[in-house]
Image (cartoon, rainbow, N blue to C red):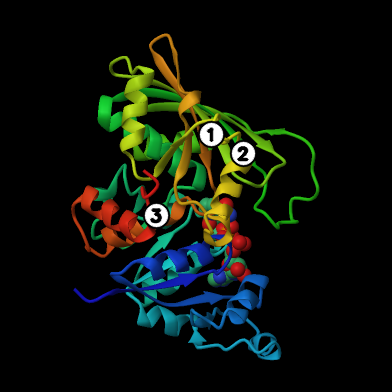
Amino acid sequence: MSKIKVGVAGYGVIGQRLADGVARQGDMELVGVADLAPTLSIRALKEKGMPYDLYLVDGADKSQFDAVGIPVSGTFEELIDKVDIMLDSSPGGVGAKNKELYVKHNKKAIFQGGEKNSVADVFFHGYANYEKGIGQNYLKLTSCNTTGLIRSVDCLDRAYGIEKVAITIIRRVADPGDYHRGLTNALQMDKAPSHQAVDLMTIMPHIEATGILVHTPVTHGHIITVVAKGKQKITKQMALDAFLTHDRIRVVTIDEGFKGNASFFRYARDLGNPRGDMYEIGLWADSIVESGDDIMYAINIPQESVTIPETMDGIRAACNMETDRLKAVAETNKYLGLGKWK
Ligand SMILES: NC(=O)c1ccc[n+]([C@@H]2O[C@H](COP(=O)([O-])OP(=O)(O)OC[C@H]3O[C@@H](n4cnc5c(N)ncnc54)[C@H](O)[C@@H]3O)[C@@H](O)[C@H]2O)c1
């Protein structure tokens, strides 16, 4: 099978990582990326020697790119023409507008969490509902928190059956380097139920879910605590056994030094991972507790990189590259080096 040709729209926090993720897949080709302005990320792309061709979306001022010597390979529509599938990681809401062009050029697309669910045919998660994405034209990925949350709940659900979950999300307020949320030192409440719990029920309708979200003035990852009720009692050992088998869940302990969200960020940098990224969620073995018949645990969500593997799964599903869920996620995991720490 020839390589599936992929383009990325919006070379921001997520788009850079999607481009890198595609470039690592041996059976996919990254044709190029599209953006609107010579942002710092685009300037860094140029300083790195343009490993990815750049195309300009409508409204971009080419003279601004020329002025700083950034080579441009063509227009957004030219990029769309060359690919089998677009990954849209433009700002939330812009993807719905870009979709008009994907439809016009009869191309598949995968949107990120900031778009409305109505932008796509399927709300997608590589592990939980891979089969629903097979052969579809438009997928929407779950948001970062939902992606990681579903990984862990799906893991227990497939092993033992889950009836109900209640979550608390301690949410990082912005990404590292962001200024648009100001310099803050306060916690902020969201109205319940959190969208992540509602989204989980959309993807896993057999599970009743609810939850509360608290914004915190940190940037290195969200932490979610989950209380889950199994169809049978799930002991601490049963939960641990299941989590340890999952290649996108890194089971750690506080005693090893994983004290919190920042420990994961530092560890990823020590590993030499580009930008301090981690594709896997962290799960503290010493956070797993039994509460009556329920099981409770805490996970770390590296918000900038967690949705990349499930997006690669989405390409495999939408482009009919693989119809078997486990084979598909295993291919993605192989190319991204997931599970290699075991
Ligand atoms: N940042 C996160 O932690 C995170 C996590 C998961 C999902 N998401 C979702 O991913 C999507 C992208 O978020 P982000 O944080 O990467 O945003 P971002 O602001 O970092 O990047 C968006 C990029 O799109 C470019 N752009 C602007 N208009 C465009 C257009 N018309 N067409 C193409 N590109 C355009 C911008 O110049 C920018 O480079 C959103 O749906 C968001 O909700 C973000």
The local secondary structure at tag 2 comes to: strand
**Label annotation for residue 171:** 2
Q: Earlier in the sequence, mark 2 or mark 3?
A: 2
- Give how far across and how far down residue 171 sits, in percent: 62, 39
Q: Which circle, 3 or 1, is nearer the viewer?
A: 1
Residue pictured at 43% horizontal, 85% vertical: 78
Label 1: which residue?
A: 256
Q: Is residue 92 visible?
A: no
The one nearer the camera, 84 or 342, is 342
Residue pictured at 58% horizontal, 65% vertical: 12
Residue pictured at 53% horizontal, 38% vertical: 300
Seen in the picture, residue 25 relative to 30 is either above or below; the reply is above
Q: Earlier in the sequence, mark 3 or mark 1?
A: 1
Seen in the picture, residue 28 relative to 275 is either above or below; the reply is below
Tag 2 near tag 3, CB within 8 Å: no
- Quarter of the figure with residue 109: bottom left
Q: Which circle, 1 or 2, is nearer the viewer?
A: 1
The three-letter code of the residue at mark 3 reads Pro
